[in-house]
Image (cartoon, rainbow, N blue to C red):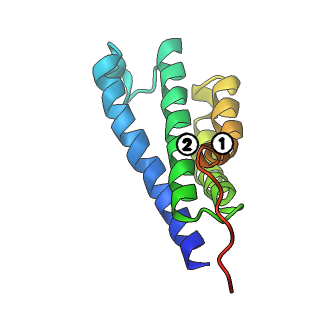
């Protein structure tokens, strides 16, 4: 159980770290992104790039969760669902600033992508009692 709790906490931290690092890269790579980031007046390529870094961070978080708690079937889903719960209020408050496809793509793929990231590593056997 402690291993699962640690995996969930590390998965959440890994997602935050990965998306932060990837966002720094996005500021350097995509012209104009840094200038509009605070206003959230993103172009379509910027929106797609943001969704892509969220997807990559979700996959990485899932892999971290599986590495820490290889026997836990539910830990990746817990991380993904906690993330949905954390992001839902901000997406509701920003509902009119982005198209519905953007919100739905982010929110509906978050948990499945974490679970997919976990599937990249082999699932371990439950520990003996």
**Element class at badge 1:** helix
In the displayed structure image, the side of residue 68 where residue 37 appears, left or right: left
Say whether residue 56 is visible: yes
Find residue 43 and name its label: none
Find residue 116 and name its label: 1
In front: label 2 or label 1: 1
In this rendering, the answer to whether 116 lies above or below 27 is below
Between the C-alphas of marks 2 and 1, the distance is 9 Å
Could you tell me which residue is drawn at 64 percent across and 55 percent down? 76
Whole-percent x and y of residue 54?
52, 36
Could you tell me which residue is drawn at 49 percent across and 13 percent down? 45
100 or 75: nearer the viewer? 75
Q: Are marks 2 and 1 in contact (CB under 8 Å)?
A: yes
Could you tell me which residue is drawn at 56 percent across and 78 percent down? 2
Residue reaching furthest left? 28
Identify residue for label 2. 58
Whole-percent x and y of residue 107?
66, 39
Q: Quadrant of residue 123?
A: bottom right
| Dot 1 crowding, Cα within 10 Å, few <14, some 14–19, many 20+ | some
Location of the N terminus (image quadrant): bottom right
Could you tell me which residue is drawn at 70 percent across and 32 percent down? 104
106 or 66: nearer the viewer? 66
Whole-percent x and y of residue 43?
48, 13
């Amino acid at each position: 159980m402690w291993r699962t709790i640690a995996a969930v906490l590390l998965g959440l931290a890994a997602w935050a770290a990965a998306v932060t690092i990837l966002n720094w890269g996005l500021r350097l790579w995509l012209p104009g992104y840094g200038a509009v980031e605070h206003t959230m007046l993103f172009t379509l390529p910027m929106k797609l790039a943001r969704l892509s870094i969220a997807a990559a961070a979700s996959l990485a978080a899932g892999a971290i969760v599986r590495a820490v708690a290889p026997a836990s079937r539910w830990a990746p889903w817990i991380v993904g669902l906690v993330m949905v719960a954390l992001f839902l209020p901000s997406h509701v408050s920003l509902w009119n600033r982005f198209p519905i496809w953007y919100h739905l793509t982010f929110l509906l793929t978050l948990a499945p992508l974490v679970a997919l990231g976990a599937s990249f590593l082999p699932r371990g056997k439950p520990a003996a009692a």
